[in-house]
Image: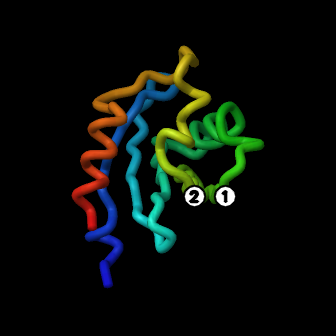
């Protein structure tokens, strides 16, 4: 059985309202992945959740400045692609999927 450390990888980061957000992919028991978004402060997390994550069809947990989404990164981030407040860094679908494929 894998430990949390072995199952977790950083697969993307982005800028939201001029602050860096770090994202992790965690393989879940169903074979999919959970997206963990770590914001620099709680207000940024709340603002991001209200703008992009409310009314989505996945489970979401907020813990202070961290958002845990029970969906893959592409599903979570789809709405933010064309928003001026969000600037993606070091992210492409091929990179993410290739990285996740090495976690087995």
For the point 33% across and 62% down, the residue is: 8
x then y, percent, for residue 9: 30, 56
Residue 79 vs 75, above or below: the answer is above
Q: Is the residue marked by circle 2 packed among few (<14), some (14-19), or many (20+) residues within 10 Å?
A: many
- Colour scheme of the picture: rainbow
Question: Which residue occupies the extreme right position in the image?
Answer: 55
102 versus 88 height, above or below: below
Callout 1 secondary element: loop
* Observer-nearest of 49 and 28: 28
Please tell me the numbered disc located at residue 70.
2
At 46% from the left and 48% from the top, the residue drawn is 38
Percent coordinates x, y for residue 34 in the rendering: 49, 58
Do callouts 1 and 2 mark residues in contact (Cβ within 8 Å)?
Answer: yes
Which of the 4 image quarters holds residue 62? Answer: bottom right
Most foreground residue, 5 or 57? 57
Whole-angstrom CA distance, mark 1 to mark 2, is 5 Å
Going by the picture, which residue comes out furthest to the bottom? 1
Return the residue nearer the eye: 75 or 61: 75
Percent x, y of residue 44: 57, 37
Question: Could you say whether the residue bearing mark 2 is in a helix, strand or loop?
Answer: loop
For the N terminus, the image quarter is bottom left
Number of numbered callouts drawn: 2
What residue is disc 1 on?
59
């Amino acid at each position: 059985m894998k430990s949390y450390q072995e199952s977790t990888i950083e697969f993307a980061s982005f800028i939201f309202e001029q602050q860096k957000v770090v994202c992790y992919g965690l393989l879940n028991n169903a074979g999919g992945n959970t997206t963990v978004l770590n914001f620099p402060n709680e207000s940024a997390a709340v603002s991001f959740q209200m703008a992009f994550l409310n009314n989505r069809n996945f489970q979401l947990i907020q813990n202070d400045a961290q958002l845990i989404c029970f969906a893959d990164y592409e599903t979570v981030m789809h709405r933010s692609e064309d928003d001026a407040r969000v600037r993606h860094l070091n992210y492409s679908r091929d990179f993410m999927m290739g990285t996740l494929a090495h976690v087995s």
